[in-house]
Image (tube, coloured by chain):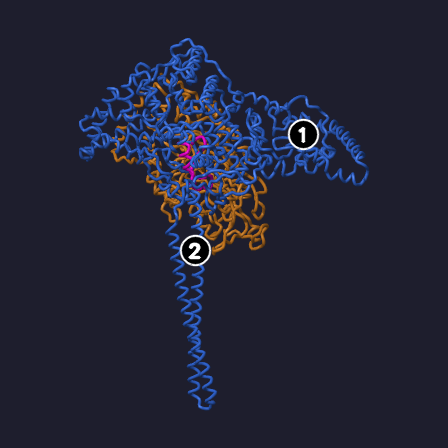
Chain colours: A orange, B blue
Amino acid sequence: MKPPRISRRGWLRSASCGLGALTVSGLAPVEASAGLLAPRSPHFAPRAKRVIFLFMAGGPSQFESFDYKPRLRAAGGKKGLKKGTLLAPLARFRQHGECGMWVSDAFPHLAGQVDHLCLLNAMSAPSRAHPIAVPMLHTGEFQFVRPSLGSWVLYALGTENQNLPGFFTIKPTRTFGGPANYGSAFLPSTYQATRLGWEGQPITKAAISNLSPQHGLTGATSKETLRLTQQLNRRLMPQTNQVQGVMESLDLADRMQDAVPQVLDLSQETQATLTAYGVDGKATDDFARQCLLARRLVEAGVRFVELTCNGWDHHSGLDRFANKAAQVDQPIAALLTDLDQRGLLEDTLVLWTGEFGRTPETQVLEGKETIGRDHNAEGFTAWLAGGGVRSGLTYGRTDELGYRAVSEEVHLHDLHATILHLLGFDHTRLVYRYGGRDFRLTNVHGEVVHDIVA
Amino acid sequence: MRCAIMNTQRALIPGLMLAAFIVTGGPAAYAEETGDAAARRGAELFEKNILPILEEHCFVCHSSQADEIQAGLELDSPAGLRRGGDSGPMFTAHDPESSRLLRMLRHDADEAAMPPDDRLPDEVIAAFAEWIRLGAPDTREDSGPTVREQRLKDSMKHWSFVPVRPVSVPPVQNTDWPRNRLIDPFILARMEAAGVRPVRDAGREALIRRLSFDLTGLPPTPEEIDAFLNDRSPDAVERVVDRLLASPHFGERWGRHWLDVVRYAESSGMEFNFTYPHAWPYRDYVIDAFNDDRPFDVFLTEQIAGDLLPAEDGDSPEDIQTRRVAAGLLAFGPKRHNSGGMEFRMDIVDDQIDVVFKSTMALTVSCARCHDHKFDPIPTRDYYALAGIFLSTEPLYGTIKQKYSNNPTELLPLGPDGAEKHRIAEAHEKQIAAADKTVQEKETRLKEAVAAEEEQKARVQEADQLLAAVTSRLEASSDTDPAAAEAERTRVEQAAAQARTELSQKTEQKAAAEAELKAAKAHLEELKKNRPPRPRYAMTARDREKPADTKLAIRGDYRTPGDVVPRGFLSAVHVPDSPPVNPEQSGRLELARWIASPHNPLTARVMVNRIWQHLMGRGIVPTVDNFGLIGKPPSHPELLDALARHFVEQGWSVKDMIRQIVLSRTYQLSTVADPDNLAIDPDNRLFWRAEPRRLEAEAIRDAMLSVSGRLDRTPPDGSSVTALGDQLVRGIAPEKIQPPSRHRSVYLPVVRDYVPEIFDLFDFPSPSLVRGRRAVTNVPSQALYLRNSAFAAQQARSAAERLLAWNPSADDAARVDHSMRLAYGRRPTDQERTAILNMIRQVRDAEQQAGADETNAVQRAWTAWFLTLFSSAEFRYLVDTAASSEGTAS
C-alpha cells in the first residue's frame, strides 16, 4: 500500500490548524519527520532565507559601540536625570563608509562594514532585568515557556538540508531560562535547537551529543547494522507510515554523522579565511571559530544559527570595553565580508543584539575599582545586516543623553515581527494551536518596521 | 447586578452634586429635581450628540454589527455600553475626569487612542464629558441579550457542559463480533454504518506485548509469553490482564501518565531554576494511588484539598499525611522565585487554576485571567472567584532564602515522628547558630585580649625605658637632691612593676580568652557533628489564616483592581448538590467536591477519555486537555457517556475502566491495515484496527534495560534531587542532575529544562506545561542516540553478554530467536533469521579482521545485533507483525 501523500498546500492548511495537524501526526498519514521539516511556502516573497543571531549576552553598552552621543561626552561628570552622574563615552566615535555611520573606535573592523549594517539605535525591550529580558528576547515571553525564535523560524521555513538539523545554537548560556531559550516548548521537538557546546566551554571542545559512536564497533559494522535495521523496518511499512519516518531518521542520522563533522571541520577553510576571521588570534580565536561555523552551517542550508558571546554586562570594567569588543569585532566583520563574497548576505539575515543596553550614567559598584553602567531597556542599539534590510541606514534615535528611544523606536516585539516579515511570514498568521489558543511569537504585540526593509 | 449597584452608590456621592447641594442648601427634594433635570438634559444630549457619534465612529468595531467585536465592547446596546469592554467599564457616571472613555477620546498617552486614526473635534469630546457628568443616561432599551450574553448562553449548550446521560446499547448486525456490551457494540455500530469492517484480532504475541507495555510499560519476558501462548483456556487474556493490573509496575506506568497531566517536576523552572528536593513524595503518592486503585474522585479531591479533608474513623496518621502529600500538586508548579509579592502569588494562582482545570475538566480556565474566555462560557469573574480560593491557599514548596529566591516556605515533615524530628533538628540548628555566634564573640574577645596584651607589653617597655633613663640621669648628675632622686626612682620603679603586674594579668586574660574560644569552637564542632537526623519532607498546601474573596484584576493586572468577586466555581457548569464555599476556609474542599462530583458533566468524561487515549492511541475526544468549544467533538459521544457512567457507577475505579477497555474486542484488534477501510476512514477514527503506536521515552529506556538485564525493578528510595539540596540548577554539573541510574524511568529526576537526554529526544512533554497527549516525532537525533550513545552501547554490550551466557548449548539461531523475543516479543521469520545470522557472521569476521580476538569479535557481533534491535522501528512500536502475510494491506 502506498501511503497517501499530503500536498504541501494541504500540509500548510493543516499546519495552520496547528494541533490538528501536528499532534495528530501520530495518526494522520503525514511523514513524521520530513513532513515537519519540509521547506514551506511563505505568506509572501521572502527577503531572507536564514538567520544568524549574534547574541551579545549581558547587554552591551551602546555608548561605547554604536550610539554616537556628543552631548553626553560634553556632559560627562554632570548630574544625570536619574540618580547618578553622567558618564562620557569611553570610546571615540568616527564616521565611516559611504553612509557616514558613526561607530566607536572599539569596533575598527565592523567600522569597515557599515555599508552593510542597518543600525537600530532606538531599540526598546520590556525589562531591564536579565532573567526577564533574556527569555523575552529569545521567546517573546518570560512568564511562560514559549518556543524560541529559532524554533518558530524552523517551523515556518523547514530545513533546506535534510542532512543537518535546521536550528543550531552554539555555546548557549545556561542561565536565565537556559535551554528554554532555544527550546521548542509546545512545538514538536523537531524544532528545538541542536546544541553545540555550553557557555564557558572552549569552542574547540564543543560537541554534538551522540554524533560519535560510543559502541567501539568499526565503521563497516555500523553501516551493516543500519542496513539490517532498515531491512527489518521495511516489514512494518504496510502498518504505519510512521515507519517511513523512522527509516528516514535513521538515514538522516547516518548522513549527519558524515555531514556534521564535515561542516564543523574548519580545517577545510583556507589559511586566508582563518586569518581573516581571527582564528588563532589571542582575543578572537573562540568567537572567530564560532562565526566561521555559523557561515559554514548556513551555507550548508541550516536555517537558524545562534552564537552567544557572554561578558557584556559592564557594571564595572567598562574601561576594558574595547578588549571585549575586540573578541567579536574582527570575527563578525569577517563573517559579513565572507557572506557577502559568497553571495549569501543578500538572503541571510544577521542580527546583533544584547537583551538590552546601558544607561548614560556612571555606576560604581562597591568593592570594584572600575566603573561601569547599569542596565537600560528603554533605549539601546541592535543592528541587522543582509537579508533584505536597508543597509547603511541608521534608524531611530535616543534622546541626546541616551536615556530612552525618542523617535523611530523599535520594540523587541517589532524586531521579532520584522524578522518574520523578512523571512516571508506575517507574524500574526504564523500560529500554532496549543491548549485551546493560537500562539504566536509576538503574542498580541509587534508591528513590522517597514522603514528598515529594503 | 452587582455592578449596577456599585455604580448607583458611587453616583450618590460625587463631589459635583455634593457641592451643588451645599451651595443651594435646599431640601433633598430640590436636589432630586435637579438630578431629574440633569438626567433629562443628559438624555437629550445622548440622543442628539452622543449616539450619532457612536454610530458613525465606533459601531464599526464595537457593536454587534462589527465583523469581529473589538475589545469585547458592544456599544449598540445599553447593557453593552454600561458594561464596557474586556478591560472593564469605560466611565463612571457623573465623574468625567476618572473616566477612561475621555482619556481615549482625547488620545491621552496612557490609553488606546479612540477612534484610532483621527481625534474627534474638541466640542464632541466636550459633549461626552458633559454627558458623563450628567450621569451618562442611555435612552435606548435592550432589545435582547448582547452578543456576549448570547454567546455565553449558547456556549453553555456545548456538549461537554451537558450532563452525562444514560445511553442505550446500539443494535449491531454482526452480533457475534462484540465481546462486551460496554464498548464493542458502540464501536461496531458506527463501523457498520460507515461500511467499514473490523480487521482480524491481534496475534497472541502481539497482544501480550501490547498489554504488557500498556499496563506496565515493560516488555513481556519470554517466559510470560510462553505461559500465555500455552494457556488455551478462554480466560487466558483475562488472567494476563489481572496479573498485569496487580503488578506494582502498573502504578509506575499509569502514574507517569498522570504526572504528565499535572506537569510534575523537581525544580522551579523559569529564568532562575531552583531545585525542588522534596517533590518526589508526590510522585510516589501518585504511583501508589494507581497501584491501590484509589477511587479517582478521591484521588482528585486529595490533590486539590487533601489537607482539608476531615479525618474519618479508621484514618491512620499515615492516611492523613498521604492526603497532605497529595496536595503537593498545588506546590511544585513552575515559579519565578526571584519575583515577590502579589505578582508572585498571582502567577502561582494562575498556574494552580490552569493545572487543576486542565487536568480534571479539560478546560482552559486560565484564559479568563485578563478577559472573558474567547470561546468557552468562562467570564473573568469566574476566574477571580477561583483566584480567591487559591489566594486563600498557601502552597508549601520549601526553598531557602538565597540570591534570586525570595519566598521560602515551610514543608511537610514526613513520618510518624517527622514533626518531632523537624522540631529537634530546627532547635539544633538554632543551637548551632547560637554556638556560631558565641565563637564569633569569643574570637572578638580574644582579638581584644591579644591587643590589650600587646598594648601592655608596650607600656612595660615604656616603663622600663623610663626607669633606665631616670636611673642613668640620676647616676650621671650629682647635684640633685638624693632624697628627691630616690623618690623619683622609686616612683618610676613602682610604675614599671605595676605595668608588669598588669601585663601578667593581661596575659592571663588572653590565655583565658584562648581557652574560651577553643571550648566554644569545640562545642560548635560537637553540635555540627551531632546534627540530629532530619525527617523527610514533602511539598503540600494549606489554608491561609484569613481566607478571603479577591478583587477582579482588570486586564489581568492586579494593580488595577475591580469589584470583589465572591469565591465560587464555574458559573456555566451546573453541578447539583454541591456545597458552597465555606467562608471559614479557602474553599478548596468544596471546589474539590464540585469537581469530583458524579454530577460534574466533565470530570468523569475527561478521565475515561484519557484512559481510552492511552490504550487506543487517540481519545474519543482527540483534544484530551480541551473539552471546550475549541476542542474537537467526540467521535463516539454515546460511548464516551457510557464509559463515563460506568466509571462513576463502579466507584471511579481506574483499574476497572482499563480492564473493561483492554478486554474489549476493539482493543484486541490487530494493527494491520485494510485498503478498503483506509479508503473510507484513513485516520482510523472508527477504530477499525488497533492504532500502531510508538512507545514513550520511558518505555523505550525501560525496554532497553529489560533486554540488557540491567533494569533494577525496585523503586529507588526517594530522588537523587534531594541530595542536591536547595540550589540553582545551572550551578549543578549535568552529570549530577542526571546521575546514572538503572531504575525505571519514572524515577529519573524531572528537573525542568534538564530532563534525561532520552526524554528530551523522545517527546517527553515539557514539565512546565500541562499536557495529556504527547507528540510523536521521528528525528535523527533519536537515531543517533539509539545507535551511538554510551547508554545504548552499554545496554547492547550487557545484552550480548547476557545472551551469550543464557544457554551454553544454544546455537546462534537459537540466540537470535531468544534475543528477538526479548526485544520484539516474537520469533523471527525464517527470512529474518537468515539475514540476521548473516549479519552476525559478517560482523564477527570483519571485527576479527580488524584485530579483535574471537571472543571479542563474537561479543561485538552480538552487540551490533542488539544495537540493530534497539534502533529498529519494531522495538519502539506496538504493531502486530505475526502472520503479517494474511493481514498485509499492500
> Residue under mark 1: which chain is it in?
B
Is there any visible trace of residue B760 in the rendered image?
Answer: yes
Q: Which image quadrant for residue A309?
A: top left
Residue nearer the viewer, B729 or B885 = B729
Q: Position of residue B840 (x, y in %)?
A: 22, 27
Q: Secondary structure at mark 1?
A: helix
Could you tell me what secondary structure mostly forms the magenta stretch? Answer: loop
Quadrant placement of the C terminus of chain B: top left
Circle 1: residue type: Arg
Residue lying at the far front of the rendered structure = B313
**What residue is drawn where x is 31% and y is 21%?**
A234
Q: Secondary structure at mark 2?
A: helix
> Residue under mark 2: which chain is it in?
B
Q: Return the mark for residue B436.
A: 2
Q: Is residue B253 left or right of residue B93?
A: left
Circle 2: residue type: Asp
Q: Residues within 10 Å of mark 2 (few under 14, many from 20)?
A: some
Residue lying at the far bottom of the rendered structure = B479
Quadrant placement of the N terminus of chain B: top right
- Mark 1 and mark 2 in contact? Answer it, CB < 8 Å: no
Q: Position of residue B624 (x, y in %)?
A: 46, 25
Q: Which residues are magenta?
A: B259-287
Q: Position of residue B705 (x, y in %)?
A: 30, 32
Is there any visible trace of residue A436 in the rendered image?
Answer: no
Q: Is residue B580 magenta?
A: no
